Image (spheres, rainbow, N blue to C red):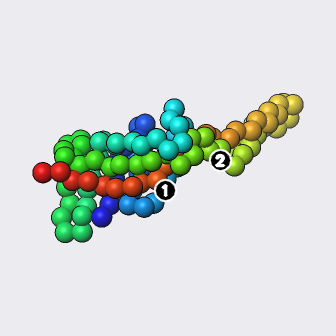
């Protein structure tokens, strides 16, 4: 059983008992989330596709780490023969969540 959900404008394929990195959310560690923006749901036998969301399907998740930083990437801009060089680093901030259950009601 899996579902495709939308969190903060991005789409993710989720399964039960799997963790997921999503963009930074203002939640505390241990908080529970009820995600109802389910775009597709597959239970092994049939597939439900929403227009845009599937009704009566919710995904329950729990926050494992509220602030998780990805590894640093380096952005380097360069123009030859113009004495132009810019070096900049970036670390994206994520929230680590655990998918606890995918529920279909009625």
Q: Is residue 73 left or right of residue 18?
A: right
Up/down of 101 relative to 30, above or below:
below
Residue 96 % position (x, y):
53, 48
Asked whether, in this view, residue 6 is left or right of residue 81, the answer is left
For the residues labelled 1 and 2, the Cα–Cα distance comes to 15 Å
Left or right of 27, for residue 51: left
* Residue 27 or residue 54, whichever sits in front: 27
* Residue 19 visible in the picture: yes
Residue under numbered circle 1 = 19
At which x and y percent is residue 17? Answer: 42, 61
Q: Position of residue 67 (x, y in %)?
A: 60, 40
Query: Which residue was labeled with disc 2?
Result: 70
Query: Is residue 53 positioned above or below 98 on the image?
Result: above
Disc 2 is placed on an element classified as: loop
Q: Nearer the viewer, mark 1 or mark 2?
A: 1
Q: Residue at x 70, y 39 (%)?
A: 90
- The quadrant of the image that shows the N terminus is bottom left
Local crowd at mark 2 within 10 Å, few (<14), some, or many (≥20)?
few
Q: Residue at x 24, y 64 (%)?
A: 43
């Amino acid at each position: 059983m899996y579902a495709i959900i939308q969190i903060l404008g991005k789409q993710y394929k989720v399964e039960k008992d799997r963790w997921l990195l999503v963009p930074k959310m203002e939640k505390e560690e241990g908080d529970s989330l009820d995600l109802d923006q389910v775009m597709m749901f597959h239970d092994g036998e049939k597939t439900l596709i929403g227009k845009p969301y599937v009704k009566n399907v919710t995904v329950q998740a729990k926050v494992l780490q509220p602030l998780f930083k990805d590894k640093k990437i380096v952005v380097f801009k360069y123009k030859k023969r113009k004495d132009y060089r810019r070096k900049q680093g970036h670390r994206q901030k994520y929230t680590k969540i655990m998918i606890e259950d995918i529920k279909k009601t009625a």
